[in-house]
Amino acid sequence: MSVIDYARKLSKKCDLLAKSIIKETNVSYVTNPLNYAWEYHESYLSQYSNLGAKTLLLGMNPGPYGMAQCGVPFGATEIAKNFLNIKGGFTDPPNRHPKRPVQGLEFERQEVSGTRLWNLLKDIWSTPNNIHKNVFLVNHCPLLLLGDTGRNITPDNISGKSVKSLLKSCDDHLRSVVDYLEIERVIGVGKYAERRANLALSDLDIEITTCWHPSPASPLANRNDGKDWRDNVSKILLAEDS
């Protein structure tokens, strides 16, 4: 199996759990970019998953303006289209929130977190290929989870039997990717991602650490006009070179 095969497998498992998650939690809408934006995600995986990166950057789950539009972890549509050269099409998921349209790579609003992170990676390694010779990006959970009002809900804020099954499937997928790519170091983007990596990979000889999350809602990400965030993430990304 390949990284693409593992992503398809995870997508199918997540689709089976969507209705149960809505029934058991305060989540009102569940959509799966690995389904309706699969061509975008496959474009990312096929171009960049086998370039030799031994460090994995692990995110939490998609936001409505990033991966939910372009299928790329921490994606922003301008980055995906004009820098990463993502190709393909998408379908409009029938179960999406009415206030959260899916417009694919033509979506105009740019995801701040994704723009910050990818621009930093670009500043360090210049080209998409050079980036992915050093780091590969994965979200632990591929699902976009929204409340009644369209509020983004993250997996750490829900619980129940279906959520437990979801997280188990996501942990299994992470293990498979780490094993297939022979990953040596996982950097959780934020504490939650670090915690999931520790749970999923506890018996493997892999370095697991964390960096600050680029979200504009995070005081750490905004401190000193973002310079402190860039310094934190750069230092951790380049630690093996020091």
Image (tube, grey):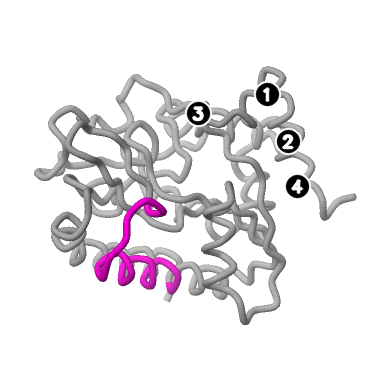
**Extreme left residue here?**
94
Q: Residue at x 25, y 41 (%)?
A: 146
User: Marks 1 and 2: CB-CB under 8 Å?
Assistant: no
Left or right: where 211 falls relative to 5: right
165 inside magenta stretch: yes
Could you say where residue 87 lies in the image, as x and y percent from the top left?
Answer: 36, 40
Q: Earlier in the sequence, mark 1 or mark 3?
A: 3
Out of 120 and 85, give the one closest to the viewer.
Answer: 120
Q: Is residue 203 above or below residue 238?
A: below
Q: Main secondary structure of the magenta part?
A: helix
Binning the other alpha carbons within 10 Å of mark 1 as few (below 14), some (14 to 19) or many (20 upward) gives: few
**Looking at the picture, which amino acid does disc 2 mark?**
Ile
The alpha-carbon separation of the residues under discs 4 and 3 comes to: 21 Å
Q: Is residue 234 above or below residue 82?
A: below
Of badges 4 and 3, the one in the foreground is 3
User: Magenta region: which residues?
Assistant: 155-172
Q: Residue at x 16, y 40 (%)?
A: 96
Q: Earlier in the sequence, mark 2 or mark 4?
A: 2
In the picture of the structure, the residue carrying the numbered disc 2 is 124
Q: Quadrant of residue 195?
A: bottom right
The alpha-carbon separation of the residues under discs 1 and 3 comes to: 11 Å
Q: Earlier in the sequence, mark 1 or mark 2?
A: 2
In the picture of the structure, the residue carrying the numbered disc 3 is 217
Of badges 2 and 3, the one in the foreground is 3
Q: Residue at x 69, y 57 (%)?
A: 209
**Extreme bottom residue here?**
203
Could you say where residue 85 lies in the image, as x and y percent from the top left?
Answer: 46, 36
Of badges 2 and 4, the one in the foreground is 4
In the picture of the structure, the residue carrying the numbered disc 1 is 223
User: Can you tell which mark lies on residue 236?
Assistant: 4
